[in-house]
């Protein structure tokens, strides 16, 4: 999937977060989104996913204005903070099978195995560690068979072993020409996979480099 | 034992009692299903509001059914309740747009309107007895007739089909709205469908358990199940078991001792909740001691 962002500006009340941002993310490209806290990385992701309202003709997926899309298809999203409804019991298998809008098949099993979810597959989601929880959200995003995958700080609270398996999964997805936008504060993470970097700063400006 | 024999004999001989039992068993299944979504989506207050606004529909229905001869137009109060309940969901949304920072105000306004209209129409409808008003508020075994049972059965089957077809989307929406949106689920339509189903459940089953207790039937069995379950499936199954047991025992006690059925069922539901809470506390106490 190709993503075009054209002259996108976004402000929360008085504070300008994104200032006339334009970039293209080509089909199968891996773009790492860098910037300190508060520079607008999460806001840009919210704009791309229409979680916040954006002006018409500012973001296009495969040349279609996303404001004209009734629903997203094949977009995977791994959020920084998951807003699960806590306390209500639900286990990992239920979360994942509900995320998969079809009968379980080889693809489903492949994702579960790739992210090593089997050891806690039947556990209540409220009893998982931060790393296990993150793996579940990544698996959930991949079950949507994404052509565009957006990850918001996926390494927070995840140990080194799981970071390595995440890198392996991302590498496989890149080989399958999935377009990836990864937001992180760690420029070294995924440097082997990144085609380009988009760095945001505190005043709403940005730079793109290889 | 004598009482039990009397109850079962009556069940065989007395048609309205059979209707009421069928209605009870349907609500025992449907209420926890709907109640789970109500709890996760934090819609408990909406359930209460809609039941009160639906009561206004029922009382207005009764008023016009007495005013207009049934050979001209037959008005079914339950249908009026359903219509009011559905209109109520739209009024809540409309009022919410006026009070962006005090969204719960819309529900208080609608609840007050429902109670006020109900009070007015009960007062001006000729021939309304205290026992009828009591039945509306706290439920009555005798309030379910043949027409009602048809509506109840159709509603129950329709909700079960909807739940079967869309359970994946509903669970996704309930637990993570952002993900549901991104994964292509039409969140707005599904949310609307859930609220309309809630409105229908409330007005259809209100007759049996009463306006004041219908939301308790949705909430309490699920609230108990949450405490002793480890998965969504287990929670729903336990909630249905708690609900059906309360309904059967509540039904028996209500019939034999002439207690209001809604109140009896809800009290038994709360008793199960207290037993579960006590068992959990005792378990925790022993686990702590062992450690």
Image (tube, grey):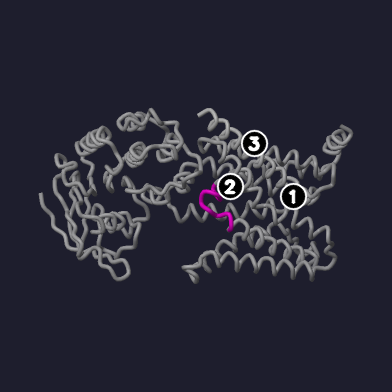
Main secondary structure along the magenta-highlighted residues: helix
- Mark 1 on the same chain as mark 2: yes
Q: Position of residue B132 (x, y in %)?
A: 81, 58
Q: Chain of mark 2?
A: B
Q: Chain of mark 3?
A: B
Within the magenta stretch, is there residue B99?
no
Of the image marks 1 and 2, the number of the one nearer the N terminus = 2
Quadrant location, the N terminus of chain B: top right
To which residue does mark 1 refer?
B263
Q: Position of residue B259 (x, y in %)?
A: 81, 48
Task: Please report the bounds of the magenta region as a residue range.
Answer: B37-45
Residue A144 in view? no
To which residue does mark 3 refer?
B241
Which numbered mark, 1 or 2, is in the foreground of this view?
1
- The part of the image, by quadrant, that contains residue A208 is bottom left
Left or right position of B71 against B203: right
Of the image marks 3 and 2, the number of the one nearer the N terminus = 2
Figure label count: 3
Which residue is farthest right? Answer: B2
To which residue does mark 2 refer?
B34
Q: Position of residue B177 (x, y in %)?
A: 42, 51
Between the C-alphas of marks 1 and 2, the distance is 20 Å
């Amino acid at each position: 999937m190709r993503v075009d962002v054209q002259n996108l500006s976004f402000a929360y009340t008085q504070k300008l977060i994104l200032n006339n941002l334009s970039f293209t993310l080509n089909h199968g490209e891996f773009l790492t989104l860098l910037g300190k806290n508060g520079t607008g990385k999460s806001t840009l992701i919210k704009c791309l996913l229409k979680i916040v309202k954006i002006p018409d003709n500012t973001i296009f997926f495969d040349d279609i204005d996303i404001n004209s899309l009734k629903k997203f298809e094949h977009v995977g999203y791994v959020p920084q903070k998951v807003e699960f409804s806590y306390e209500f019991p639900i286990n990992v298998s239920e979360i994942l099978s509900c995320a998969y809008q079809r009968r379980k098949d080889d693809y489903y099993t492949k994702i579960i195995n790739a992210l090593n979810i089997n050891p806690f597959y039947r556990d209540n989601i409220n009893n998982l560690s931060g790393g296990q929880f993150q793996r579940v959200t990544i698996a959930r995003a991949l079950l949507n068979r994404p052509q565009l995958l957006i990850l918001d700080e996926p390494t927070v609270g995840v140990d080194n072993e799981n970071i390595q398996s995440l890198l392996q999964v991302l590498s496989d997805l890149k080989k399958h020409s999935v377009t990836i936008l990864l937001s992180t504060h760690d420029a070294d993470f995924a440097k082997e996979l990144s085609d380009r970097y988009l760095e945001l700063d505190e005043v709403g400006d940005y730079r793109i480099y290889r | 034992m004598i009482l039990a024999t009397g109850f079962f004999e009556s069940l065989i001989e007395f048609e309205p009692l059979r209707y009421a039992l069928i209605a009870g068993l349907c609500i025992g299944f449907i209420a926890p299903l709907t109640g789970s979504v109500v709890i996760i989506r934090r819609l408990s207050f909406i359930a209460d509001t809609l039941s009160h606004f639906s009561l206004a529909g029922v009382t207005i229905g009764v008023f016009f059914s007495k005013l207009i001869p049934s050979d001209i137009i037959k008005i079914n109060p339950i249908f009026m309740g359903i219509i009011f309940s559905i209109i109520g969901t739209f009024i809540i949304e409309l009022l919410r747009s006026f009070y962006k920072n005090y969204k719960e105000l819309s529900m208080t306004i609608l609840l007050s309107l429902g109670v006020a209209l109900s009070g007015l129409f009960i007062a001006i409808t000729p021939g309304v007895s205290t026992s009828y008003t009591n039945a509306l508020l706290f439920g009555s075994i005798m309030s379910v007739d043949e027409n009602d049972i048809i509506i109840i059965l159709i509603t129950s089957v329709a909700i079960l089909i909807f739940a079967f077809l869309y359970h994946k989307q509903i669970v996704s929406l309930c637990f993570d709205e952002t993900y549901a949106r991104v994964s292509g689920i039409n969140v707005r339509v599904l949310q609307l469908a859930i609220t309309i189903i809630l409105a229908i459940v409330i007005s259809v089953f209100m007759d049996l358990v009463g306006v004041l207790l219908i939301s308790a039937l949705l909430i309490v069995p699920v609230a108990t199940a949450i405490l002793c379950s480890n998965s969504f499936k287990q929670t729903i199954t336990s909630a249905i078991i708690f609900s059906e047991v309360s309904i059967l025992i509540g039904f028996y006690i209500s019939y034999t001792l002439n207690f209001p059925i809604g109140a009896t069922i809800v009290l038994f539901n709360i008793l199960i909740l207290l037993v579960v809470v006590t068992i959990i506390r005792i378990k925790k106490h022993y686990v702590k001691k062992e450690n």
